[in-house]
Image: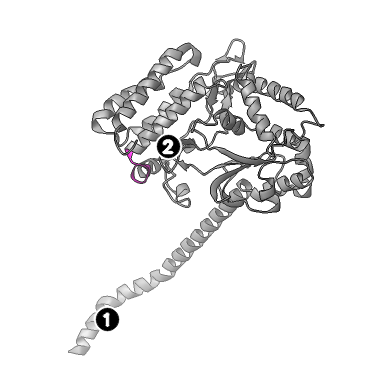
Amino acid sequence: MRRLRRLAHLVLFCPFSKGLQGRLPGLRVKYVFLVWLGVLAGSWLAYVHYSSYAELCRGHVCRVVICDQYRKGIISGSICQDLCNLEQVEWRTCLSSAPGQQVYSGLWQGKEVTIKCGLEESLSWKAGADVAPRRDLVLFDKPTRGTSIKEFREMTLSFLKANLGDLPSLPALVGQVLLMADFNKDSRVSLAEAKSVWALLKRNEFLLLLSLRGKGHAAPLLGHCGDLYVTEGVPRSSGPAAALPALLRPLLPPALHGALQQWLGPAWPWRAKIAIGLLEFVEELFHGAYGTFYMCETTLANVGYTAKYDFRMADLQQVAPEAAVRRFLRGRHCERSADCTYGRDCRAPCDTLLRQCKGDLVQPNLAKVCELLRDYLLPGAPAGLRAELGRQLRTCTTLSGLASQVEAHHSLVLSHLKTLLWKEISNTKYT
């Protein structure tokens, strides 16, 4: 009986087994191919990641260049001794988004800091031994000789007038520059001190940090060495990918980033508080003591906040003085409006008859910021607020034309938005 059962089993299943055995070599080939493809794709991703990291993160080049110039007596600054001789400035995570601007988190004097150092595009990380001499010629070129404080003051004032406009408040800003240059408080500005602060003034962000000092919208400046400078802390980013681990961000589609931001990002009242700070920052750029500034790369990645959810601009590199933007656009040849673009999104109309860019921007700062806030504030907003908030944000995004021509409307829209948000979160733990 048992033999009959075994025979029946063999009759029933042997044909299937033979078929399976026939398919096994083909399956093995497929699996080997898939594994090989996975290894190849992983190796390619690792290579691309390493290549981009090596190109973006060149802090070691910054340190070598800066300390070489410091030891030669070409530059100086309040943190040079700690950076180059005592090695008390700790460089941590690379945060650079462009090879020309090195950004690192760090530690100095027991404080979390951000370290920023500009690298000229010609100073490639592959450049080798001639990096420092070329940097000396390119960047630390002025003043060329020792000058009196009076001469350096006039030189600085002329530079600021050219970049910010002829404003009555500029002498006060010149005073800040001279105080920073004379970091050792010996009542004189040496050639090394003058070269260092002159190189710093050429950095858009540094100029804005001075202009916004004490306003709370930008990280306080703590010290410098040459054109390397250190600011307080690293603000947390409000961008959709900020809540995600760094390795996952490139793998997820943009639509999913937004959804995850709502789940993992700050609660809505905290977002409202951050948004109010952003609106106040826009107001300061428009009515600031040192002229008007334009936000020329308006993304949530540049919107940061502190541990207490106070707004803090994460990157000021693309915030440009009105005078600089107008100088760039004036008389510029164009075929279409896209040719009249400063930075990423400061765009002016193109006069197609004259084929020249006009000087007035199409969209003011506030309109661009309100476009960001629609995606940032409307999801998760309280039900009783959502309709009115949406209406005000839509009105805000339609602002256009030269800001000075719509000043009253601009201020009114901004004031209404701030009031609406404050009313919702006032007298709660979120304020």
Q: Quadrant of residue 202 in the image? A: top right
Kindly give the residue lying farthest to the left in the view shown.
1
Label of residue 169 in the image: none
Decide if residue 404 is on the left or right side of residue 59: left
The relative height of residue 6 versus residue 227 in the rendered view (above or below) is below
* Residue located beneath label 1 in the image: 10
Provide residue 46's location: percent of width, then percent of height: 55, 55
Residue 120 on image: x %, y %: 69, 38
In this picture, which residue range is highlighted in magenta? 261-268
Is residue 263 shown in magenta? yes
- Give the camera-side residue of 138 and 424: 424
Give amino acid for label 2. Answer: Asp
10 Å crowding of disc 1: few (<14), some (14-19), many (20+): few
**Image location of residue 18, percent across then percent down:** 35, 75
Q: Is residue 305 left or right of residue 390?
A: right
* Residue 1 in sight: yes
Confirm whether residue 402 shows in the render: no
Per the image, label 2 sits on a secondary structure element best described as: loop
* Chief SS of the magenta region: helix
- Relative placement, left or right, of 246 versus 157 is left
Q: Which residue is mark 2?
A: 310
Alpha carbon separation for disc pair 1 and 2: 76 Å
- Mark 1 and mark 2 lie on one chain; the one further toward the N terminus is 1
Q: Nearer the viewer, residue 136 or 79?
A: 79
Q: Nearer the viewer, residue 231 or 374?
A: 231
Where residue 139 appears, as percent x and y from the top left, is 73, 36
